[in-house]
Image (spheres, rainbow, N blue to C red):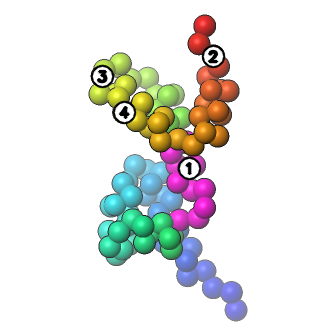
Amino acid sequence: MRTFASQPPRLAFALAMQHGATSGAVAAALGHGSFELTQRHCVQPGTMDSLKQARVSAALETPQPSTPANLAELIDKLQNLSPDQLAQIMHTVGPAD
């Protein structure tokens, strides 16, 4: 018989992260001592990259006042993206004129 014991933690992780929870908070909620343990057992390959990309997309789509703190946060998020994710953003945004 096929079981899905690993699905609830994976689902909980994905939902919590999509709604802004930190990786540490999710790890603690699942009873893990570290995020590395959570990532090893509950996170499917590519999930973290997808979540980062979604957060950057949301940040770019949401109008916010340009303050140094918001700009620094956006730059930090962009610096943590993979080359493929950056290429996709550049393709979507287009070159600066």
Residue position marked by numbered label 2 in the rendering: 95
Vertical relation: 74 (above or below) 97: below
Per the model, the C-alpha gap separating discs 1 and 2 is 23 Å
Q: Amino acid at mark 1?
A: Asp
Instruction: For label 2, count other residues whose C-alpha is less than 10 Å away and answer few (under 14), some (14-19) or many (20+).
Output: few
Residue 85, magenta (yes or no): no
Q: Secondary structure at mark 1?
A: helix
Highlighted range, magenta? 43-53
Q: Nearer the viewer, residue 70 or 82?
A: 82
Residue position marked by numbered label 4 in the rendering: 73
Per the model, the C-alpha gap separating discs 3 and 4 is 8 Å
Residue position marked by numbered label 1 in the rendering: 49
Q: Can residue 51 be seen in the rendering of this structure?
A: yes
Q: Position of residue 11 (x, y in %)?
A: 53, 66
Residue at the image point whose x is 63% and y is 16% from the top: 95
Q: Can residue 12 be seen in the rendering of this structure?
A: no
Disc number placed over residue 68 in the picture, else none: 3
Q: Amino acid at mark 2?
A: Pro
Magenta stretch prevailing secondary structure:
helix
Q: Earlier in the sequence, mark 2 or mark 4?
A: 4
Left/right placement of residue 42 relative to residue 20 reads right
Per the model, the C-alpha gap separating discs 3 and 1 is 25 Å
Q: Secondary structure at mark 3?
A: helix
Q: Within the image, what quadrant is residue 5 found in?
A: bottom right
Residue at the image point whose x is 29% and y is 27% from the top: 69
Asked if labels 4 and 2 touch by Cβ distance under 8 angstroms, the answer is no
Residue at the image point whose x is 30% and y is 22% from the top: 68
